[in-house]
Amino acid sequence: MTTASIDASQRKAAGVVGLSYLLVIPPALFAGIYVAGQLVVHKNAADMAQWIMSHERLFRLGIACDLTAFTIDIALIAALYVVLRPVSRGLALFAAFCRVIETALFFSVTLKYFDVLGLLSGADYLQGLDANHLQSLARLAISAHNSGYNVGLVLAGVGSTVFCYLWLKSGYIPKALAGFGVFASVILATFTFAYVIFPEYAKIITVSYYGGPIFLFELAMGFWLLIKGIQEPGSRPS
């Protein structure tokens, strides 16, 4: 497969892709693994509420890290489109729209965390409501956040699958790396979509199964694009 010669805008965008992949990892891991992991441990509504209010600054830091990661994702998506548009404008646009909707959904469900803080704040306008009721509503808001986030991950998997297919088709990076990206993205999309139909599987197939491969791919891509960059199609062995 050959495409038009790589131009300067593509090379710059590839650098943005690599940098974005690496910059997004620390805030995403902190918010999505560490902070969210604490919420999973405290399944009881009262225990969860107590943990959140006794670690409110940490909880807010998790929100800030989420917002930072989602903002970096915007730059990542735009850069991916610029790099891969010459391969197939239609597919690159489809993938970009999937990822943009995913990111918008992530921003939207993050508002649920502010609802949690509001419900547990003890504000005067909440004095007429029972504490147990407020804690249950806060727990419901967290569940709504998690459900919305899972839907976002389905779109992330679909968009990433198409982008990785374009990487594979382009010849800009090693085919083995692009192929692994397709595999990791399909796993992400498949497992998170399966949770919509079979939610009980979430207790068996944890985030490490579908998150591990895509994490390794994005980490490898980040370093590859920053160190090696993209190369002309046909200039590397298949």
Image (tube, helix red, strand yellow):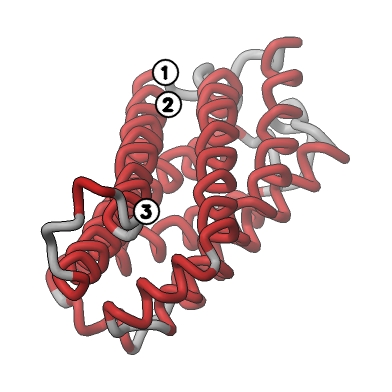
| Residue 89 - label | 1
Q: Marks 1 and 3, Cα distance to the nearest angstrom?
A: 43 Å
**Residue 194 visible (yes or no):** no
Q: Secondary structure at mark 3?
A: helix
Compare residues 10 and 15 and report the one nearer the observer. 15
Question: What amino acid is at disc 2?
Answer: Ala
Give neighbour class at mark 1: few <14, some 14-19, many 20+ (Cα, 10 Å): few
Q: Which quadrant would residue 195 be assigned to in this image?
A: bottom left
Q: Residue at x 31, y 50 (%)?
A: 118
Compare residues 231 and 68 and report the one nearer the observer. 68
Question: What amino acid is at disc 3?
Answer: Leu
Q: Residue at x 80, y 47 (%)?
A: 223
Residue beneath disc 3: 117
Q: Are marks 1 and 2 in contact (CB under 8 Å)?
A: yes
Residue beneath disc 2: 92
Q: Which mark is nearer the camera, 1 or 3? A: 3
Q: Secondary structure at mark 2?
A: helix
- Decide if residue 25 is on the left or right side of residue 62: right
Question: What amino acid is at disc 1?
Answer: Arg
